[in-house]
Amino acid sequence: MPYGIDVTNGNAYPGYSLPGANETFYWINNTANVVYISNCGNWATPDSCAVPAAANGQPGTFQAQVLRNPNGLGYAFSDTGWDAPGMPHISVGAQAHAEKDKVA
């Protein structure tokens, strides 16, 4: 399953799962506006990006990667499209995903 993060709430986008350390993922934007992601350089690269707006029934995407050794404390970032309560963060940390994979 591909890895994708919904820019509006930090959850895995439907049909995607959350990435673990050193995994490539997509920021996915299903809104009518460009979303600007920033301040995520302690756990992902690039540190900032512009995720295109949805168009023609397809969400906008931007490819990124979780660092090999991410600082997983909160997996926080800044996000102009955030519409969920609280500060922008991945709601189920990528570190938890990586730990689960080690056990499986």
Image (spheres, rainbow, N blue to C red):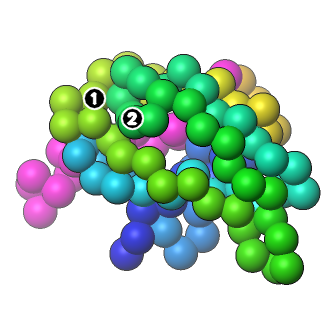
Label 1: which secondary element: loop
Where, by quadrant of the figure, is residue 25 drawn?
bottom left
Q: In which quadrant of the rendered image does the C terminus lie? A: bottom left
Question: Residue, x 87% and y 50% (percent of image)?
Answer: 33
Distance CA(mark 2)–CA(mark 1): 7 Å
Residue 30 versus residue 75 in the image, above or below: below
Please, what is the three-letter code of the amino acid marked with disc 2? Ala
Residue sitting at x 30%, y 22%: 71
Left or right, 9 with respect to 48, comes to right
Residue 42 x, y percent position in the rendering: 37, 21
Residue at the disc numbered 1: 70
- Residue kind at label 1, given as amino acid type: Pro
- Please tell me whether residue 88 belongs to the stretch shown in magenta: yes
Give coordinates of residue 6: x percent, y percent: 63, 53
Q: Which residues are magenta?
A: 87-104
Residue 7 visible here: yes
* Image quarter of the N terminus: bottom left
Check if mark 2's residue and mark 1's residue have beta carbons within 8 Å.
yes
Residue 102 place in picture, x, y as percent: 10, 52
In this orientation, does residue 17 appear?
Answer: no
Query: Is 2 positioned to the left or the right of 11 in the image?
Result: left
SS at mark 2 in the image: strand
> Which mark, residue 56?
none
Q: Residue at x 23, y 46 (%)?
A: 22
Residue on which disc 2 sits: 44
* Res 70 quadrant in image: top left
Circle 2 crowding by C-alpha within 10 Å: few under 14, some 14–19, many from 20: many
Does 10 sit above or below residue 29?
above
Q: Residue furthest left?
A: 103
